[in-house]
Image (cartoon, rainbow, N blue to C red):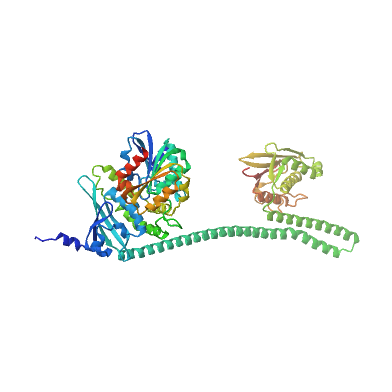
Amino acid sequence: MNYNIDYKELYNSFPSGCFCSLPNGLIIDSNIKFLELTNYTKKELIGKKRFTDFLSLGSKIYFETVYSQALILSGNLEEINFDFINKDGIKFPVLINSIVIRGKEGAHLFTQSVIFNISQRKQYERELLISKRKANDLSDELIDANEELLSNAELISKQKLQLEKFNQHLENKNRQLSSFAQIASHNLRAPVSNLIALKDFYKESMDLEDKDMIFSKVEIVIDHLSETLNELIDSVKIQENEDIRHDPIIFDSVFVKTLGVLDSQIVDSKAVVTSNFSDAPCIKYPKLYMESIMLNLLSNSIKYSSPERTAKIHFYTEIKNNTIMLVITDNGLGIDLEKHGHKLFGLNNTFHRHVDSKGVGLYMTKIQIEAVGGSITVESEVDRGTTFKIILKKNI
Amino acid sequence: MLEKLIAKNNITVNGTGSKSMFLVHGYGCHQNMWRFITPQFKDDYKIVLIDLVGSGKSDENSYDYDKYSSLEGYADDIIEICDALNLMNICLVGHSVSAMICLLAALKRPALFKKLIMIGPSPRYINDTDYFGGFSQNDIDELLETLDSNYLGWSSAMAPVIMDNADRPELAAELEQSFCQNNPEIAKHFAKVTFLGDNRDDLKKLTTDTLILQSENDAIASIKVGQFVHDTIPNSKLVVLETTGHCPHLSGPEQTIHAMKQYLM
C-alpha cells in the first residue's frame, strides 16, 4: 500500500519533544511538542535558547561535567534524567536521548535530541526510592536487633557456664559435707561410747583409787577426742581453701625442718633418713602443704617401720614429662594393697594394728596434694616397704 | 612499586619530547578527554596522563574515602607519580576540579612544576558573601540527586555503540570499559568533595607561572569566577576562549591548543 506521508507534519505531531542543536548548544529547530514543553513560541526559542537554559543548576552541572563530554566522546547517549524548567518556572523531570550528527569529514554538525516528560514515572520512582530507603533502614534495625540478640545469647551462655560451675562447686561441697558428717559420726562414736562406759564405771565404782584411774582414762579419751576433732576441722579447712598462695620452696629446707620436728621419733626408731633433691631443687607450692605432706609421710614411714631391720627412708625429687614428682620410699612393714588399696587414702582407715594409728594423715595428705592439682600414688609390698609417688605440679 | 602505582592511576606515558607535560582530567571524566589536545604536543613533550583514583580505569579498590575526602589526597598522588617517574620542570595541566588539585600539588612541591595551566578552574562553587561561585547548597543537592537517578544510565546509556570511532575500535572498547567501571558511590563522594570544597585561600599562595583558560560561556565556572582566579593568583595570565561549555578542550580543541602553545612558547 502507498501512503502519502508528510514528514514535516509527522515530526510536528510527534508525541515527544524533538530538537536539533548546534555543537555550541544553540537550538536551531524543534517540533511543536518541544515548544509545548518549554512554553515558548518558536520565535522566542529558535536560535536563541540552549537546552541548558531549561535545566536546573544541579542538572546543569551534570550536563557540563558528564553528559556533554560523554556525548562528544561516544556520539550517542540515552535515558539521561534531568530536571527541566519551562518558561513559567514549572519544573518537571525529563529523560533525554541525544545523537551527534557528523559531516562527511567527521566534523560535528548537529546534535539531535528527544525528550520525554517523566513526571508520573518519576513520582513512582521516588516512592520506590523512599520504600527502598525504609527497607534499608528496617534492615539496619534488624541487623542491630540481631546483634543485640546475639550478644544477649552470649551473655546467657556465659551465665549458664558460671551457674554450671557454681553448681559443680555446690555439689562438691555437698559431697564433702556428707562425707564429713559420716566420718565425724564414725570417728566420734567410739570415743563417746568409750566415755559413756567410763562414766558408768565411775558411778558404780566405790573405790577412790579406781575412780582416779577411771578419770585418768577419761582424760586420755578426751585428749584423743579433741585431737580427732581438730584434724577433722583441718581437713575441712583444706577443702575450702581453693586459691591458696604458692610460695617459692626449696625442698631441702622443708626437709631439714621436718627432720627437726620429728627428731625424737627418728632417734627412738634409729631410722636412717636420706634425701636427694638435685633433680628438682625447688618449686612454687603452698608452704604449709609441703611441710604437712613431708611431715605426714615421714612420720608414717617411721611409725610403720619394721622391727626386724633398720628403717631406711629416702626422699627425692624427679622431673618426668614436664612434671615435678616427690618420691618417698621406705623398707618398712608395707601395705597389702589388694586388701586395702581402695581405701588407703580414706579417712580413719588404719591398716596396721599399731598403737598410734589414727588414719587421718594420709587422707589429709591426699586432700592437700589434690587441692593444688596434683595426685598421689602408692606402690607397696608387705614386709618389703612402701613407695609414695607424688605428682606435685604439671607443666612446669 | 611503580607497577602498582601505574595500575592505581592507570598511568600512560607517550610522546617523544624532552620536556614533561602532565595532564589531569576533571570531574566526571577520565584521561581520554585529552585526546584532541595531546597529539599536538607529543613531539615536544613526554606526555603523562592519569585517571584520578575512582575515575576511568583507575584501581577502584585504591579509593580510600578518608584520603579522598579532600583534594589534598589527589595532590599527593600527583606528586608521588612525578617522583616515581623522575619528572622535572613539569608543565602541569588541570581541568575543572583538577585545576585545584594541581594548585595544591604546586603549593606542596613548587620546585617540581615549571608552568601550571588551569582549564575552567573554580576555587569554590557555592556563593558566599562578596563571592559569586554560581551555585547554592541546594543546587549541589540537586546534582547529587541527578547522579542518583542516572546511576543506571552509567552502565547502559553511557556505554553506547561508538559511532565516530569506527576507525579506532580500541578507543570504543576503552570507553565502554571506563564508563562501566564508574562506581556510583565513588562518583557521589567525589562530587561532594569537588562541589563543596573551598580553595580560595590557596590561590594567593601560588608562586608558579599560571595560565587560566576560560570558556566564554561556561555554566560551571563562569567568566566571573575565572576573573577571580586570575586576580587572586599573583603570577597568572587569563585567556578567554570563544568556546561554549565547561570543556573547551573538547568543544574547541583548536583554540585551546593555540592558547596553550602561545603560552608555552
User: How many numbered marks appear?
Assistant: 0
In which quadrant of the rendered view does residue A168 lie?
Answer: bottom right
Q: Identify the residue at image location x=65%, y=42%.
A: A324
- Residue A260 is situated, as x and y percent measured from the top left of the image, at 80, 43
Tell which of A32 and A237 is nearer to you.
A32
Q: Is residue B65 visible?
A: no
Q: Residue B14, how many percent across, how many down?
A: 34, 37
* Residue B80 coordinates in the image, percent (x, y): 44, 40
In which quadrant will I find the C terminus of chain A? top right
Left or right? Give the position of A43 relative to A312.
Answer: left
Residue at horizontal 11 percent and vertical 61 percent from the top? A4
Q: Nearer the viewer, residue A210 or A357?
A: A357
Asked where in the image residue A381 lies, by quadrant, the reply is: top right
| Quadrant in the picture for the N terminus of chain A | bottom left
Q: Is residue B144 left or right of residue A221?
A: left
* Residue B120 visible in the picture: yes
Q: Of B231 and A327, which appears nearest the observer? A: B231
Nearest the viewer among B160 and A158 is B160
Residue lying at the far right in this picture: please name it.
Answer: A208
Residue A46 pos. (x, y %): 24, 59
In this picture, residue A154 sits left or right of residue A41? right
